Image: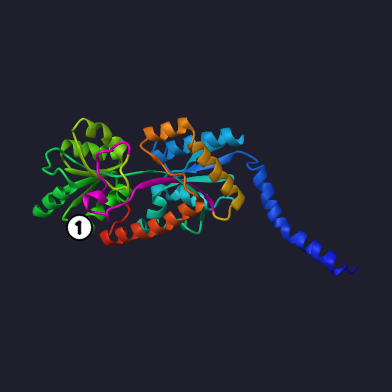
Amino acid sequence: MKLPRRQFLHVAAGAAALPAVSRIVKAQTYPARPVRVIVPYAPGGPTDVFGRLIAQKLSEQLGRQFFVENIGGAGGNIGMGRAARADRDGHTVVMVATPLAINPSLYDSVPFDPIKDFDPVTLAVSTTTVLAVHPSVPAQTTRDLVALIRANPGKYSFASPGTGTPSHLLGELFRLSLRLDLVHVPFNSGGLAIGSNLAGHTPLSFGTPPPALPHLKDGKLRALAVTSRTRVPTLPDVPTMAEAGYPDVEGESWFAVAVPGGTPKEIVALLNREIVKAMALPDVKERLATLGFDSIASSPEEFGARIRTDTEKWGKVIRAANIKAE
């Protein structure tokens, strides 16, 4: 049977609209079952703590359980690789951090592409890195420290929470951009790195604020600068690297939410909206501040741009310093 032209066009237009209608219906009924939240690190770390906080709030707001599954190993690569291969229906979410942008350059191979295999949801929070020195170091400012290192080549070293961590890479950026003879001493955690700094074994340290804060307040360590673009509330009197005269030494650790690439955009938008709403809650804001996090709650597009810029930026540092994963 031959349809009249007007009726044919109407049927064709309706058929073309079906995929879009299907996506909208899926978003309206999402989540249809419990949602797995992959944390690609062991329990107890900052990504895990943040992930559990957001999972709890999403469970409350959307009426379905968001449950955390820790899949650690290989600096987060195993869990991120598992997430990259998960179904693209919104029922797998992954908590990612700066290593999403670092690991492709740090390791010989990784089981994911940070740009192609994930759709960004939000860059949720960030935390700065603090350059701290032992009180025995005769430097009151970063400029003093640079002059001191240059006058004593090979004498000074800096501690970090581990090879390839954002704090380590910021220390290398400091060393490379200023052409300093400075030795890196990696540890397995921020606490151990600060412990070495406290004991004077490593006179400098680059690390996130929480492990250092009590010792900075007690005067057992001295903070010279933070690497974020702006000063941080927990260390309001400490200048940024830019204020200290070194704007190229800039960067921070971030924690974010992503989904497997190809997840319906309506679901990505819903997750972004609900996470941003959760992060505005007073109890969440208080908890994030306690953890030393600065809230960002970006759009998916802003987070995607950050992945691309950080992948390029840290790749250059890793290659220039010839850093390999241990």
Q: Quadrant of residue 237?
A: top left
Q: In the figure, is residue 271 to the left or right of 176?
A: right
Q: Quadrant of the N terminus?
A: bottom right
Q: Is residue 234 magenta?
A: yes
Q: Label 1: which residue?
A: 178
Q: Residue furthest right?
A: 1
Residue 184, image x, y percentages: 22, 50
Q: Residue at x 13, y 48 (%)?
A: 144
Q: Is residue 120 visible?
A: no
Position in image of residue 241 (x %, y %): 25, 49
Give the vertical position of 302 relative to 124 (above or below): below
Q: Is residue 73 above or below residue 292?
A: below
Membership of 158 in magenta stretch = no
Which span of residues is magenta-colored? Answer: 233-260
The colour scheme used here is: rainbow
Label 1, residues with CA under 10 Å away: few <14, some 14-19, many ≥20: some
Q: Is residue 171 left or right of residue 156?
A: right
Q: How many marks?
A: 1
Instruction: Please state if 314 lies on the left or on the right of 14 as rendered.
Output: left
Q: Is residue 140 visible?
A: yes
- The residue nearer to you, when weighing 5 against 121, is 5
Percent of width and height locating residue 292: 35, 37
Indicate the amino acid at tag 1: Leu
The x, y position of residue 206, in whole percent, is 25, 45
Q: What element does badge 1 sit on?
A: helix
